[in-house]
Amino acid sequence: MQFLDLDGDRAVAAVVDGTARIVNDTASVYDLTIAALSSHGGLAALIEAKGLGDTVDRAAILAEGRMLSPIDHPDPAHLYVTGTGLTHLGSAATRDAMHKASGAKPAGELTDSMKMFQMGLEHGKPSAGEKGVQPEWFYKGNGYSVVRPGHPLPSPGFALDAGEEPEIAGIYVIDQNGQPRRLGFALANEFSDHVTERINYLYLAHSKLRACSFGPELRLGDLPHHVEGMSRIWRDGKVLWEKPFVSGEDNMSHTIANLEYHHFKYELFRNPGDVHVHCFGTATLSFADGISTQPDDVFELEASQFGAALRNPVRVQAEHPLIVGNVY
């Protein structure tokens, strides 16, 4: 995890068996990763070589607003936030209902969402050496759209909804040879505007252009085959809504490798030094249960395999005046 120490300086800690200790002489997970890519031992070996120092209090760091996202880029424009949808078993039900409600397809006829979901079920887990079907894909933003754990998620003044999406995100850095190198995985709130999406599913791209948050901790290594966590919304100090969410390949219609291939097959996403935060989808939304969030509601995502919970309140932004002028 990355955080600001009591002097306001950046620091990195490794969390082992629930105890966080400072990684010596390290101020950035990105810099640590670039250094690891230049050696043969990898990230874990480099951390071991640097050694661990003092223990730090994760709860205090979060409570004091000093937690940073578990990776960032010195130039936020070189961090991509992207994602895939209709990847989890059961994930198509809400989307299908939304499309039918908007009149996208007559009753009894498969919506485009259900067609794509079926494609994933049939061809999203290819055998070794084969290529599976493409998932739904979307662009969400760059490093400027990432909100630190514990800090407010801004909802634009023009938004029609401010809804959570509890997901797992893969975290990647592109190496000097233009190859994606996975650091690990993190909890992610893929914050979206579901009311806008419900108007017409072709508005999906608009609905995803919102802030997001991930972390607080980065889990190194492979994603467990079964991940189970809890998604909650707090209002006025009480739980307004909560529901379990699941992820991992046991609960998905695609393999992680297939989702990774269909993202990184584009040369645009293989520029050396870039960071990618790629969200893998969800099947659990409060919106599907009729919840409409309000300013100051707090989203909470937790899963024991990912350490500390991810919490972010909602804030509504004033819409900035937009004047498009000419340059002659």
Image (spheres, rainbow, N blue to C red):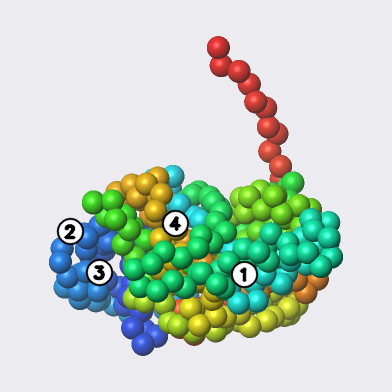
Q: Real-space Cα distance between discs 1 and 3?
A: 38 Å
The amino acid type, in three-letter code, at marker 1 is Gln
Mark with earlier residue (1, 3): 3
Label 4: few (<14), some or many (≥20) within 10 Å? many
Visible residue check, residue 70: no
Q: Real-space Cα distance between discs 3 and 2?
A: 10 Å
Mark 1 or mark 3, whichever is nearer to me:
1
**What's the residue at 81%, 67% (across, down)?**
108
Label 2 element class = loop
Q: Give the residue pinned by disc 1.
A: 118
The amino acid type, in three-letter code, at marker 4 is His
Percent of width and height locating residue 133: 50, 63
| Residue toward you, 30 or 165 | 165
**What's the residue at 44%, 44% (across, down)?**
77
Q: Give the residue pinned by disc 3.
A: 43
Question: In the picture shown, does residue 194 fall above or below 256?
Answer: above
Residue 263: assigned label = 4
Percent of width and height locating residue 154: 64, 54
Label 4 element class = helix
